[in-house]
Image: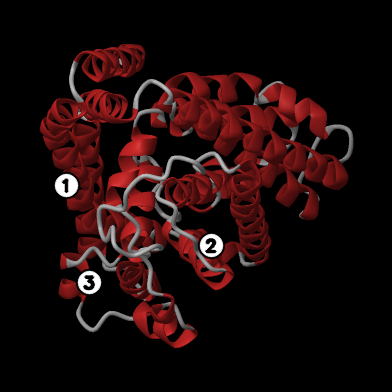
Amino acid sequence: MNRLFTAFIVGAMVLGVGVGWVLNQSLAPTDAKAWADNLSIITDLFLRLIKMIIAPLVFSTLVAGIAHMEDAASIGRVGLKTMFWFISASIISLTIGLLMVHWLQPGAGLSLPNPTDAAKGSGLEVAKFTLKEFVTHLVPKSIVEAMANNEILQIVVFSVFVGTAVSALEDRAPAVTQLVDQIARIMLKVTGYVMRTAPFAIFAALASTVATQGIAIIGTYAKFVGGFYLSLGVLWTLLTVALILVVGARGLKLLGAIRQPALLAFSTASSEAAYPRTLEELQKWGVSRRVASFVLPLGYSFNLDGSMMYCTFATLFIAQAYGIQLTIAQQITMLALLMITSKGMAGVPRASLVVIAATLTYFKLPEAGLLLILAVDHLLDMGRSATNVVGNSVAAAVVARWENQIEEPQAEPQTA
């Protein structure tokens, strides 16, 4: 199924470029634009589907994840060390994406018209992004209003309160926990249905873009994809250095051990598909079952290094494409927002698109910019999925070293 879907994605990309080129070459600019507008109906529907699932998906997955995090309280010390590493790795990943996109400038030169407000140079009102505005905006006046307006940060705050309250109850409110779990499963299934329409949206997005911008736009995509994979290389290098500094040269053997899970994540564009094999290889390498069984699943919700770096890289690429300049304060705010909103969405296909869509809405950036990255998102998802596997494996090994829970390599996973 994954291979077939990948084939559809690739076919949609090729067909979209071909149709767009034919329209660009054979029609007058006004006629090509008319065709592009008609094709945009498909992409507009896809964007609406994405926005439709944001609120229930974030709420259900985050509440369910926190409600089941009883081990974090019982293990205590391990939980604190694990979260310290996750937060540090998140900051580094987000910052690398920020610095690399500024250095490479993959979106500069496109000069796309801002569809939200073409008359304004930046499309942003700096006065709105004060510390007071950000802090007071964290807490929703009404969760119903927050969900209706897709106020992602407010939904996250409410979800954290609800999840923490559920986990603090003595009986853990089994009926509520089960209900939230079921909602999360339903929303994940709905997300899967939505993402099956991605090839059609990719075709329409590429065809309309090439029809109006010309074949030269493909060069921009090449720069975007190449720049992102170069950024992943920088992140992998830093993760490897950190691993060797903490666990020693034996860390290189860990990278070899997780080679197959990482390749599986790359080929399927799903880091979750590699979870069982990754857990097995970590224990064979020497991470105790106690640490591996705690850090790895927690990492799939709170330590998606590749996905987080992509969020900053892609969001600022969109801003560059529309000629929008964000201040330093706005970019720091964006890092803080992405630090929170990228959590708790493990197992969600194309979760980064959902997070980026919410970020664009928050910063009043053109939502149509999502279509610029949609065309090549599957190719980029392969790289960030493999990076998530590497990042979580490094996290497990580092925490195990801090806890003196690294043992001699085992032929079979060792029980606690």
- In the image, what residue occupies the spot 34% across and 45% down? 369
Of labels 1 and 3, earlier in sequence is 1
Disc 1 on helix, strand or loop?
A: helix
**Could you tell me the amino acid type at mark 1?**
Arg
**Could you tell me the amino acid type at mark 3?**
Ala
The tag on residue 202 is none
Q: Measuring from the top left, give residue 298's x and y in whole percent.
A: 52, 51
As drawn, is 121 to the left or to the right of 18? right
**Could you tell me the amino acid type at mark 2?**
Leu
Of labels 2 and 1, earlier in sequence is 1
- In the image, what residue occupies the spot 44% across and 40% down? 110
Front in this rendered view, residue 99 or 149? 99
As drawn, is 335 to the left or to the right of 351? right
The tag on residue 335 is 2
Distance from disc 1 to disc 3, alpha carbons, whole Å, reads 17 Å
Q: Nearer the viewer, mark 1 or mark 3?
A: 1
Q: Measuring from the top left, give residue 157's x and y in whole percent.
A: 36, 73
Colour convention: secondary structure
As drawn, is 184 to the left or to the right of 377? left
Q: Is residue 413 visible?
A: no
Of labels 3 and 2, earlier in sequence is 3
Distance from disc 3 to disc 2, alpha carbons, whole Å, reads 21 Å
- Identify residue for label 1: 48
Distance from disc 2 to disc 1, alpha carbons, whole Å, reads 25 Å
As drawn, is 29 to the left or to the right of 335? left
Disc 2 on helix, strand or loop?
A: helix
- In the image, what residue occupies the spot 44% across and 30% down? 270
Q: Is residue 139 visible?
A: yes
- Identify residue for label 3: 146
